[in-house]
Amino acid sequence: MWYKIMEKILDNVGYDVDCNSHPSVVTKNYQHVLALAFAVKEINGNSQILPNTTLGFHIFDCYFVAKGTYHATLLLTSTTERFVPNYKCDTQNNLIAVIGGLDPLTSLHAATVLDIYKIPQVYQSLCCLTYGPAPIMHDKTPGLSFYQMVPQEALQYEGILSLLLHFRWTWIGLLMMDLENGEQFVQKVVPMFSSSGICFAIIERVPKLTFITEAKDLLQECAKIHDKVMRSKANVIILYGESYAMLFFRWFPYLSEEEEMGEEARGKVWIMTAQMELTSVVYQRTWDTQIIHGALSFAIHSNSLPEFHKFLEHISPSTTNGDYFIKDFWQQAFACVFPSTVTNGVDQEICTGEENLEMLPTPFFEMSMTGHSYCIYNAVYAMAHAVHAMISSRLNSRFMVDNRKLPFQNPQLWQVMSAGDKVSFNQKGELEAGLDIINWVVSPNQSFHKVKVGRMDPQTSSNQLFTFHEDTITWHKWFNQVQLNCSYFESSARPISLCSEKCNPGSSKKVKEGEPFCCYDCIPCPEGKISDQTGNDCSTCSDQTYPNKNHDLCIPKEISFLSFEEPVGISLALSALSCSLVTVLVLLTFVKNHNTPIVKANNRDLTYTLLLSLLLCFLSALLFIGQPQKVNCLLRQTAFGIIFSVAVSCVLAKTLTVVLAFMATKPGSRMRKWVGKRLANSIVLSCSLIQGGICIVWLAISPPLPEADIHSMAEQIILGCNEGSVTMFYCVLGFIGFLAIASFTLAFLARKLPDTFNEAKFITFSMLVFCSVWLSFVPTYLSTKGKYMIAVEIFSILASSAGLLACIFSPKCYIILLKPELNKREQLIRRTD
């Protein structure tokens, strides 16, 4: 871990490096030192930046602890000859900027000391740049200008969320270091991710590394975390930690409280933040790195710098002066020792100084500039441009106040150029730049390749903020081996991370009690509802559609009405026409024999009226067949009601005529004046007028009109006639029923009168059939739906009309057609005697 502080020294040539020896060096971070030296070398060789001025720097190591940071920072406040804090008499070497550490606490500790001592003394403002996450300030914000050389962390939150949503990973884990920045990460991403439908299976905090922490206890705690993570169904784990976190994560495959956990452990997709790099220390040289194979990480965008590669080719202990880090780096990176450090009895390989940096595995060193090194490189250039702008401004103004130097105006670092890149900051001092998405592919020799698979760029349009190339990703081999046999297998063995498998269409999610909303059971959709391919919640189909049997699709409803083309409609229409034809034949038979006694008996005009009304009754049934229109909706019920009233009133009049005729034959009877056509005609006319009045009122207040019934039947839209006022409909039926009951009662009472002149028995049977049909009609009509309701009403019309025709006129037709000898006056008189 390198703590880096850069000191810009005007009018001083060269650089020197101070360090304390340390038993273990993170060799990969040595590139940060070289990136700083390379940037200074380039700037000093560029006459366009800081002409007549040489840039210099000091580098200090803090060893992970605040004490080391405070001590190194205090060294900046004193002269090089003698350690006296807050006292520097050197007028040439002016400290104007500090590049903080890779970890946020390092930057915060350094800034706190510098702010307390108001360093530097010459200038009124000091600029502090960090190339790691910004420290959490709370209420102790130093009065320094912080500029963060890495993109803001909020962009990483959005990037991780976009990644999870892209792959539909909704059941994830979070592993972080137990530090303030880690807690801040949790507080921000948990509600943010939850609102997008993502749940956390585990949130584990790795204990802080302190000197009082017992190694055994720490390893035991980490072993418990390891087993919990590896047993979890969550295949995606987010790693959040400081720069040195990867050193401890390298222990992860070897920590377990269970036997044989390492080789048999399930694979995971690790998503790492930009702060983390795959690094190793010397004792981890041969450790397995397959656990991170296929991991995804966010990385600080960096451009290729060919000159930096050439600069590294010339780095060796023999060619570098003043760099006291290089020998420790060289010995630990190449696992060798220099002759001057060899002790007796130690058998170690001797360092020649000519070893090739390109031969080192990538966890130890990289020849291409890493993202963090690129941030340091940019920070040096940004500071140089700012100092250049300050000097130019001071020379141009040529103002001095009381022989004092003009106070250093806080340089506007919002936009400067560095190596062809535009370095821009927002008002919070955060770098406005994007992030690369990297896929880590581990090689058998423990080296790895970083494959760029995506990009987060906040400076593009909102729909191009997140770009991703899934086809270029290499996943952990476990997913290729295991998911091939899974029912939820996806193409290219894309990892799945779900608490519950996706519900099939036709079912919905039911959250398990006491568990996050991502854990659920799948239950079938209830009747009338569906769920589509997403299998989320059941929804109701539109009024024009209905669910299929699997409840996963809405099918257009069939238009249904009683038509002439279907079997039921054809059968009823043929029945109506057949009955009409029979009625016509009966009427013709009676007309042909209108002067015969049996036709003339019991009011011949009523007989003709009854036959005509029955004919119309049969024909009125045709109004109920076919697609409903406004005209036939208005006519069919009213025509049926009036025509049936005429028919039944004719029967009532005939019955009453028979009764009165026999009562009038008694001596002194006053009933003779009522016997005749006048009474019968009055009954038929009055009953017809009453029923007609009811129908007129019905049409006036709430007429029947066409309607489409979408609710009665799930699979059909029923075209029919809305009866308008149901009360008026049953009033029409009720009046017909009243006439029928009156006719039945009178006929029943007159059934024993002499047969020669008596129709009462036939009328009794006809009314019995009529009343039976219509009494059974009401419950049957109410219990059926759709077009079959219309079929029931048509059947009732035909059955009741046919009953009247058969019971009243079949005996007379039998005599007229088959027994004409009985249709004579003499025969009637003889039978009377």
Image (cartoon, rainbow, N blue to C red):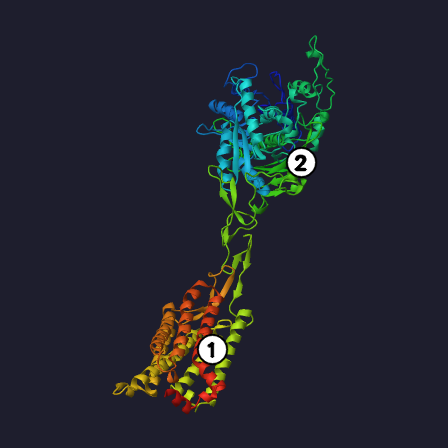
Which residue is nearer to you in this view: 293 or 66?
Answer: 293
Which residue is nearer to you in this view: 617 or 370?
Answer: 617
Q: Secondary structure at mark 2?
A: helix
How many residues crowd mark 1 within 10 Å: few (<14), some (14–19), many (20+)?
Answer: many
**Amino acid type of the residue tagged 1 in the rendering:** Phe
Q: Quadrant of residue 366?
A: top right
Question: Residue 535: horizontal and vertical position, in percent?
Answer: 54, 47
How many numbered discs, if any? 2
Q: Quadrant of residue 376?
A: top right
260 horizontally vs 77: left or right: right
**Amino acid type of the residue tagged 2 in the rendering:** Gln
Vertical side of 706 occupied by 659: above or below:
below
Which residue is nearer to you in this view: 370 or 678?
Answer: 678
Q: Secondary structure at mark 1?
A: helix
- Residue that mark 1 sits on: 618
Vertical side of 65 occupied by 148: above or below:
below
Evaluate if marks 2 and 1 touch, with contact meaning CB atoms under 8 Å apart.
Answer: no
Question: Residue 629: horizontal and vertical position, in percent?
Answer: 48, 73
Q: Quadrant of residue 267?
A: top right
Residue located at (38% from left, 76% from top): 764
How many residues crowd mark 2 within 10 Å: few (<14), some (14–19), many (20+)?
Answer: few
Disc 2 to disc 1, how far (Cα)? 78 Å
- Residue that mark 2 sits on: 481
Answer with mark 2 or mark 1, whichever residue precedes in sequence: 2
Q: Is residue 686 visible?
A: yes
